[in-house]
Amino acid sequence: KYIIGTETLRLAMPECRIGIIPDVGSASFLQKAKNIDGFSFALYMALTGTSLNYIDALYCGMIDHHIPQKDLPQVIKSLESESIDDYGRFLEGFSPEVDITESTLYQNREFIEEIFGSGGSVEEILSQLIAALEPNPTNQFLKTTKSQLDFNSPLAMKITFVVFHRARNENSSMKGILVQDWYLHRTMFYHFTENAVAGVQAILVKKSKSGRPKWKPERLEDVTTEVVQEAFDFFSREHHKISIPDIESSKFILPEV
């Protein structure tokens, strides 16, 4: 019921950096963010692969409480030995005050909502980002965001864009999104193999800190509507071949975010 994070927390969906798509139902739970437009936030996280800290996570509601790392043993000991009626109040007793105005999301909410919330394509998002940079050429957030989009896989970003729009517009269930995630991941590795291998080799195997992977296709304009449709055609053909357990009746409970 309660999600906590320490000062070491890092929250990210970096899959577009390695040529695949964000999974684990992120197209659903990221859109439930608080204090910021959920869809804009979700698409920003998914397309850029940016990493949030605990202040950002508190601001957008991805965690409920910040508890210092050093206090975790005491929290666990108390949970094991005490009878607690109100867990929220109990956790608040370990949660120091946090200055939310230090959050990158708080400081740049308007940029995120304007750029990622209204773009009709990845190209439009990038164009709006460039337009926002013109009167703000030294804005570090905008510069970093553009660098992230320039670096990431064009194919992965375009497929991700469609996945997140579908999740919003079709009111997809978590089960449906998880099934789609599973099949689209298969597609990225088995159908768009060169692209996924380029990202995995460069980022995860060689751990390259400089140089963009040799994406296939290399540019956004080379990823046509037909290419993106191939991924969803594969999903449409194959999704009936696997039996997915009913999440609602499963012993695993998905947390409400």
Image (cartoon, rainbow, N blue to C red):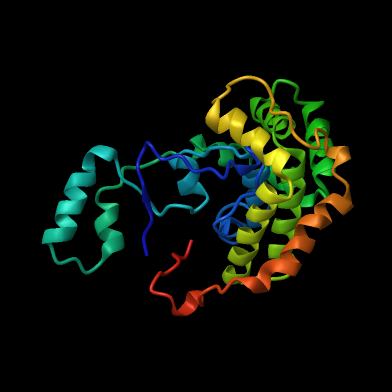
- In the depicted structure, whether residue 74 falls above or below residue 238: above
Q: Is residue 100 left or right of residue 180?
A: left
**Position in image of residue 184 (x %, y %):** 67, 56
Q: Is residue 209 visible?
A: yes
Residue beneath the point at 78% across and 36% down? 216
Quarter of the image holding residue 200? Answer: top right
Q: Is residue 111 visible?
A: no
Quadrant of the image containing the N terminus? bottom left
- In the depicted structure, whether residue 212 falls above or below residue 56: above
Q: Is residue 157 left or right of residue 55?
A: right
Residue beneath the point at 82% across and 26% down? 134
Q: Nearer the viewer, residue 201 or 83?
A: 201
Residue beneath the point at 46% across and 39% down? 10
**Position in image of residue 62 (x %, y %):** 48, 53
Q: Is residue 106 left or right of residue 172?
A: left
Quarter of the image holding residue 238? Answer: bottom right
Q: Is residue 225 left or right of residue 59?
A: right
Q: Nearer the viewer, residue 200 or 102?
A: 200
Total marks drawn? 0
- In the depicted structure, whether residue 83 falls above or below residue 24: below
**Position in image of residue 174 (x %, y %):** 58, 68
- In the depicted structure, whether residue 65 falls above or below residue 172: above
**Position in image of residue 116 (x %, y %):** 73, 46
Residue beneath the point at 31% across and 61% down? 88
Farthest residue toward the left? 81
Q: Nearer the viewer, residue 133 or 184?
A: 184
